[in-house]
Image (cartoon, grey):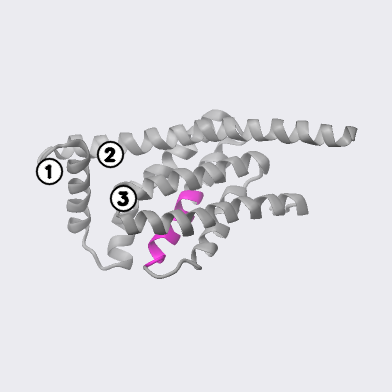
């Protein structure tokens, strides 16, 4: 992927925004132990990355933004950061695959990229838990059922409904992220275009 200086600068800006969001808001949400904080961070991060993709519609640009955000996460103070770093990179990679397969940028591709990128938050503990933190899949599964049970007011026995509910919730939030990202990108482009025209008339 050969990028111009302007495109590199744009990707750096979007990567920095995602990284700063993870450093600042991520620390606050972790301290307050907010439920679904991972979904909130993924939604904001993917919104930034997808808007960045609209400004630099090249294959690899979304992943590039995610890599920059992941590297910035290294500067987080205290706590375990390897999990969030893996999350950032994975979310960006999922979105990148979807957008690259879709080819030309379009709203539907953004919606699907946001939905699947956010859904990764639900699956990540089953990967990072055993590999990075020594947790068994059974413990991760119980944590998932506990979260869903508290969120939906169901008993852990309602396994199917909990899983379906959590999956639909993640996909819906991610789909909304993709939809809004498309509109935000178009609005920013129009505003910047008008600003440039006004500056040219001065």
Cα separation, mark 3 vs mark 2, equals: 16 Å
Q: Secondary structure at mark 3?
A: loop
Image disc number at residue 47:
none
Q: Place residue 131 in its image quadrant.
A: bottom left
Q: Secondary structure at mark 2?
A: helix
The residue at the point 25 percent across, 35 percent down is 164
Q: Give the labeled residue for mark 1.
A: 156
Q: Quadrant of the C terminus?
A: top right
Pointers 2 and 1 in contact (C-beta within 8 Å)? no
Cα separation, mark 3 vs mark 1, equals: 21 Å
All told, the count of numbered labels is 3
Q: Give the labeled residue for mark 3.
A: 34
The residue at the point 58 percent across, 48 percent down is 62
For label 3, count other residues whose C-alpha is less than 10 Å away and answer few (under 14), some (14-19) or many (20+).
few
Image disc number at residue 166:
2
Q: Which residues are magenta?
A: 80-92
Pointers 3 and 2 in contact (C-beta within 8 Å)? no
Q: What secondary structure predominates along the stretch shown in magenta? A: helix
Q: Pick whichever of labels 3 and 1 is earlier in the sequence.
A: 3
């Amino acid at each position: 992927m050969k990028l111009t200086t302007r495109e590199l600068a744009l990707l750096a800006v979007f990567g920095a925004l995602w990284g700063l969001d993870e450093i600042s808001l991520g620390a606050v949400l972790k301290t307050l132990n907010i439920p679904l904080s991972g979904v909130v961070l993924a939604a904001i991060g993917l919104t930034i990355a997808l808007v960045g993709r609209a400004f630099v519609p090249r294959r690899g640009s979304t992943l590039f933004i995610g890599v920059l955000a992941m590297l910035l996460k290294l500067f987080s103070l205290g706590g375990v950061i390897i999990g969030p770093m893996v999350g950032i990179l994975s979310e960006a990679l999922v979105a990148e695959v979807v957008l690259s397969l879709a080819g030309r940028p379009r709203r539907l591709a953004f919606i699907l990229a946001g939905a699947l990128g956010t859904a990764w938050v639900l699956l990540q503990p089953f990967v990072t838990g055993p590999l990075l933190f020594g947790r068994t899949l059974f413990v991760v599964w119980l944590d998932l059922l506990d979260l869903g049970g508290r969120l939906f007011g169901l008993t852990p026995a309602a396994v199917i409904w909990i899983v379906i509910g959590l999956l639909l919730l993640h996909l819906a939030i991610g789909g909304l992220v993709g939809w809004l990202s498309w509109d935000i990108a178009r609005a920013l482009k129009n505003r910047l275009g008008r600003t440039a025209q006004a500056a040219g008339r001065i």
